[in-house]
Image (cartoon, grey):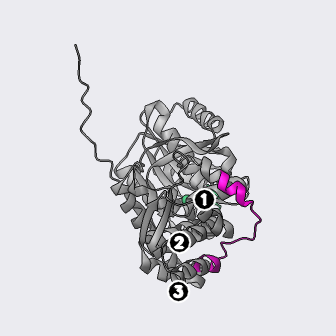
Amino acid sequence: MELKVRLKQKADYSYSIVLGKNLFKKIAADLKNKPIANKYVIITDSNVKNIYGIDLLKTLRANNIEAQLIYFKAGEQSKNSKIKEQIENEMFKLLLGRDSAILALGGGVTGDLAGFIASTFLRGIPYIQIPTTLLAMVDSSIGGKTGINTGYGKNLIGTFYQPKKVYIDINMLSTLPESEFLNGLAEVIKHSIIKDKPLFKYLEKNREKILKKDKKALQYIIKISCEIKSSIVEKDETESNYRRILNFGHTFGHAIEKTSNYQVKHGFAVAQGMIYAAKLSKTNEKTKERIIKLIESYGLIKNIKLDKKMILHAMLQDKKTIKGKVNFVLINEIGKPYITNKIKTQQIEAVL
Ligand code: ADP
Ligand code: ZN
């Protein structure tokens, strides 16, 4: 005999992204009015704990919300299974159960790690993203990708697990170091190249304002970026096809990160990767020059000596490379991407 397990019905996992300033009071009020759990645990890193974590904890408690805080040592090195287990054990010690939710307060490292914990803790508890770096605000906090690194590579273990809400507080960018700010700007530039020519033009015209962290300019580029990222994720949540356009500059970028032994930060590697991708693209010379000029004008290109052979080798080993065919996201024009696996090794070597 045979029995069927019917699992067709899909729940609605929609969530909203709140963009504003000084949001802790709003977060507390929202959790008071519409709780998503009985107890909350803020997961954050050792830097963000001091700058914002304790404040958030106090605000929640002042509103009679049961809250705890767990932190880990800041840095990409903490995004691993050992730290994940340590945090989970601390959660058990604090008697956090199924009726708990996680508030992921921090950059991409915190969001990925805390989101992954949320997805597996007691088979899954809700979580909220409160990104504090530009990279996390415009990219990693939206779309539900969670995960950790292993000795074999970055983000190799993880889940798709959507947050219940995302709170983006642009005032938090005031304390962010310059290099971290630029790291996130690379993803904003990427969004403009794959999807939004007006944003590209805005980035060309408003460089000084943006680099000075002018609030209006930041609000604008973050809002557009979130719209682009969420509209792509809406169409293809699990990256079966369309979502891959978000990998513009990333095939090269990942290889550069790896070849530099992760000394080159993600955004800077992607920036260099976007220049290579532009050069490989069908688009006209003028557009290529515009892209290169924009990326350089934001100080995203560092003169680092990289071994071209090693970059090529790393690309062939990428988790997204299938049967030796490297997948590239390229552009016909700004805002018009296409995906191809027909690029020959000689063509790649020629642009490196
Ligand atoms: P990313 O967001 O690029 O993935 P991280 O999560 O590691 O990277 O954050 C980068 C660094 O910036 C970390 O050392 C983190 O503690 C620090 N950081 C995060 N947000 C802020 C902030 N708003 N102000 C100051 N430092 C911050
Ligand atoms: Zn990226």
In the displayed structure, 58 sits above or below 177; it is above
Query: Which of pointers 1 and 3 indicates the residue nearer the eye?
Result: 1
Disc sitting over residue 87 in the figure: none
Measured Cα–Cα span from mark 2 to mark 3: 13 Å
Quarter of the rendered image showing ligand 2: bottom right
Helix, strand or loop at mark 2: helix
Q: Amino acid at mark 3?
A: Lys
Q: Residues within 10 Å of mark 3 (few under 14, many from 20)?
A: few
Q: Which residues are magenta?
A: 294-313
Query: Which residue is tagged 3?
Result: 205
Is the CB atom of the residue marked by disc 1 within 8 angstroms of ligand 2's nearest atom?
Answer: no
Helix, strand or loop at mark 1: helix
* Residue positioned 75% across, 59% down in the render: 307
Question: Percent position (x, y) of residue 175?
Answer: 64, 67
Measured Cα–Cα span from mark 2 to mark 1: 27 Å
Earlier in the chain: of badge 2 and badge 1, it is 2
Query: Which residue is tagged 1?
Result: 345
Query: Which residue is tagged 2?
Result: 189
Q: Is residue 326 visible?
A: yes
Earlier in the chain: of badge 1 and badge 3, it is 3
Dividing the image into 4 quarters, which one contains the C terminus? bottom right
In depth, the one of 328 and 294 nearer the eye is 328
Question: Percent position (x, y) of residue 312?
Answer: 65, 56
In the displayed structure, 168 sits above or below 301; it is above
Q: Residues within 10 Å of mark 2 (few under 14, many from 20)?
A: many
* Residue positioned 24% across, 38% down in the render: 9
Quadrant of the rendered image containing residue 50 = bottom right
- Is 213 colored magenta in this rendering? no
Question: Percent position (x, y) of residue 182?
Answer: 63, 69
Q: Are marks 2 and 1 in contact (CB under 8 Å)?
A: no
Question: Percent position (x, y) of residue 273?
Answer: 60, 65
Q: Amino acid at mark 2?
A: Ile
